[in-house]
Image (tube, rainbow, N blue to C red):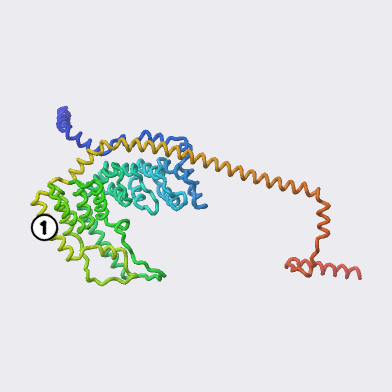
Amino acid sequence: MAALWRSIRHTRRYRGTFCKYLEFRRCLLSDNYRCQEEWQKYLNSPTLTQVEFGYLSYQMYTKFDNQGFSSLIDMDILANKIQTMHEQDHEYMQRIIKMFRRSKDAFPVRDSIVHGIIRNYLEKGMDKEILEMIQDRKTFGLFPDSYTANLLMDHFIKLEQFPEAAKVAYELMFQEDFSGRINFLLALYTCTKHLTHTATMDAHSKEEEDVQEEEDEDDDDDNVEWVAKKVVQAPHYDDHFDIQCEQYKLGKTMYMLGCVQGDNLLGRSVKLTGLALYDKFARALSLLKQWKETGEKEVVMKEAVDRLGELLNETATRDPDAPEKEYAMRTLKDDILKHNLTPEEKEKYTKELQVLSAELESNGQLSSHSLITEVETFVTGQLKNSEKADMDSYVKHLNLWEKERQEMFDQQVEDYLRNEKIEEIAQKLAELQEKEETLRFFENKQQIKRAYIKAPWEKEEEREMTLDELEEKERNKKNRKSVLYKRRR
């Protein structure tokens, strides 16, 4: 009993700190933001409840396999029935989404279908599976809208899986859309957390990837297979969708977020950090010069300038005198390497940064604030006033989606009944025509006989006879000869 009271006193002593921690973990978005009651009401609509996932998925798969298409309403219903899907049917569902992606009804992509797939996968605990599908944009075509992307990022943030949450932010970066206020705030928070929590891990994984690529290249040199091609196109690195490096994706995302944040201490620091991660050192130094010339105090955080120096010191260089590969041997990696700095450029930028950093510090233009602390304070303060508008908009979308789905369902039923009626009428017309021909035969029997008698007869020798007819003719000749021979005897 004494031990129990000691534990209770210990709990009371640290209750305030523990509750604050729980409140922070509960976290950025409130539970009301998910609009769970409205979502369940949406799933319990009559159009969805009267259909089973197994039956509908089998019918759609068969129709895709045989005809190459299925109706849009069927895919909309199936997307919202994933909640009843067994986890083992995940690959089966993937194949259906792939086939739908290649069909004519997949464009434009309906937000109701994408939201239904993503939210139901999340509620089934299959977050890693749906994240992989979202990243494979070409195969599945799942482009989450603003609200759905918020649910994804908040889900991973609550689990403290910041790399996964950052991957959702990368998809928004690829679409160049941070127009949603909560989209912007969650992306800023998760990218900053990802940077501060997994920077060492990313550097280690990058080294492993480089080693693995070198080993693969050594193995490929022994087994080179040459294939003749009519046209050889040089690879082109677009510096956007072709970005493969995790660090570059994070850097470009943070740079865009800094641009959205604006020309203030936090916006400048995020923008500079993004350019440093993105290896855009010339642009970063140009911005530092502009900020220095303004004469303002604390124009940028010292942490961002220090990170710029560290990444500039660690960046890889290219040999400007290295021989260029043959046209047909060039790969995308060769085009990416052209963007690396030369040793002379690296040395030049390093000296410029040292001078600029010293001048900024002497002028009192470097702030000692922590980037992660400023981001957490800013995001938590802004989110409180941004949820209501998103929730109201989401409820309106649910009502609109349900109304549109009911209209499409009614239209499909009407089309089915119309086609069924047309087939029935066509069948009755065929039967009536057959009966009419039978009845009119007796009325026109004499005319048919006269036409038959007056019709020109084709001589048997003049027309080309088939093999069966020739054989029959020979048999008839033999039979006639045998009959005549018997009569003569």
**Residue nearest the viewer, comparing 399 with 37:** 399
- x, y percent for residue 337: 26, 64
**Residue nearest the viewer, comparing 220 with 348:** 348
Q: Considering the image in quadrants, where does the N terminus appear? A: top left
Does 305 sit above or below residue 328?
above
Q: Secondary structure at mark 1?
A: helix
Q: Would residue 478 be found to the left or right of residue 248 on screen?
A: right
**Residue nearest the viewer, comparing 405 with 262:** 262
- x, y percent for residue 171: 32, 50
- x, y percent for residue 369: 14, 45
Quadrant in which residue 310 is drawn: bottom left
**Residue nearest the viewer, comparing 11 with 360:** 360
Q: Residues within 10 Å of mark 1 (few under 14, many from 20)?
A: few
Can residue 165 be seen by looking at this rendering?
yes
Label tally: 1
- x, y percent for residue 2: 15, 28
Residue that protrudes farthest toward the front in the picture? 294
Q: Considering the image in quadrants, where does the C terminus appear? A: bottom right
Label 1 sits on what residue type? Val
Q: Would residue 52 be found to the left or right of residue 346 on screen?
A: right
Residue that protrudes farthest toward the left in the picture? 362
Does 296 sit above or below residue 39?
below
Residue that protrudes farthest toward the right in the picture? 488
Identify the residue position indicated by label 1 in the image. Answer: 355
Can residue 489 be seen by looking at this rendering?
no
Q: Would residue 299 be found to the left or right of residue 226 on screen?
A: left
